[in-house]
Image (spheres, rainbow, N blue to C red):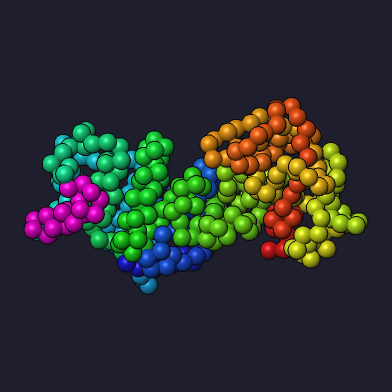
Amino acid sequence: MAAVRLDQLRKVYPNGHVGVAGASFEIADGELLVLVGPSGCGKTTLLRMIAGLESISGGTLSIDGRVVNAVAPKDRDIAMVFQNYALYPHMTVAENLGFGLKLRGHKQAEIDRRVAAAAKTLELEARLASRPAALSGGQRQRVALGRALVRDPKVFLLDEPLSNLDAKLRLSMRVEIARLHRQLGATMVYVTHDQIEAMTLGQRIVVLDGGVIQQIDTPMALYERPANLFVAGFVGSPAMNQLRGTLRHDRGWTLATAHGAIALGEPPQATAWQPWRDREVVLGIRPEHLQPRETGEAAFHARLEVLEPVGNEVFLNLRYGGQALVSRVPPRALPEPGDTLPLGLAAERLHLFDAAGGARIGA
């Protein structure tokens, strides 16, 4: 395995479009790092630059201490798993797994040994004589993973490998990939647009938007301390609630909105808020920290529009003026749609952002 280092890596297309704008970070030896963001954010372009499938416009890419900007893909010692399984339909599972090794001139005994080891790891031993048409979607994806696995590369690159699977298979294959990473201790770079996939798989996550890195951190750090409004809105399902207004302080902090004042109390993090008094800000609050208030004084009131029971929890879709909000609550006796609810905020869990630039206040 090997570490991968990106130093101001850029991709600019002939029409002037900047696909990746100066990406700099290091993927540790044995780390599973996830690149995540919306369509067109540059995550797949960045992965293809590491693979050598996209040319590098600027900056330096190193794998295992060697600069590989001008090194051909076949000489970078990487293996890539694509969104499309791309299995040869006329070959058996064993032949698909070993085909790349055969092209590289490995002896048949070595190919058989590596194929058997990969099949055992991926629980494909009983399907080695089958052809792809006889396999389920999950088994085909495991064959695609196994084809990379037999190469024993320095770095695994995975480009949205689960996007063609149904919800149940995606869950089981997420577990499969996490188990495989722990077992191999391999360096993996994983691309996805699904932030749930990113949160459950990544040891660290790189969040991109418009070709620019927005934040690099562990999953829980991204969730609990988003660096800006984009990360706050992208990471988390349902997304973080955001309320725009003017920050005031008069016998306690309040957010003055177009629909009334929201009481914020005296949060412990408010020491960083002082320079923002009487300025426009965005208040962020996760759905689980916005709760109907049964006793005590409410921070504000909102109208319940829709109830979404999903088993172990219920989403309350609320409306505050023209602003849609979501509260996540445990199953219990619930109000009726149309009711106006008093709401409380978990003061220590409030997030504040600059309304103009979007940066976190008190980062």
Q: Position of residue 324 (x, y in %)?
A: 70, 36
In the image, is 258 to the left or to the right of 13? right
The overriding secondary structure of the stretch rendered in magenta is: helix
> Looking at this view, is 204 or 182 the one in front?
182
Relative height, residue 334 to residue 55 (above, below): above
Q: Position of residue 182 (x, y in %)?
A: 35, 61
Q: Quadrant of the C terminus?
A: bottom right
Residue lying at 8% horizontally and 58% vertically, measured from the top left? 109
Residue lying at 51% horizontally and 64% vertically, measured from the top left? 24
Relative height, residue 200 to residue 64 (above, below): above
In the image, is 40 to the left or to the right of 145? right
In the image, is 148 to the left or to the right of 162? left
Residue 327 picture quarter: top right
> Looking at this view, is 316 or 256 the one in front?
316
Magenta part of the chain: 108-125
> Looking at this view, is 146 or 5 the one in front?
146
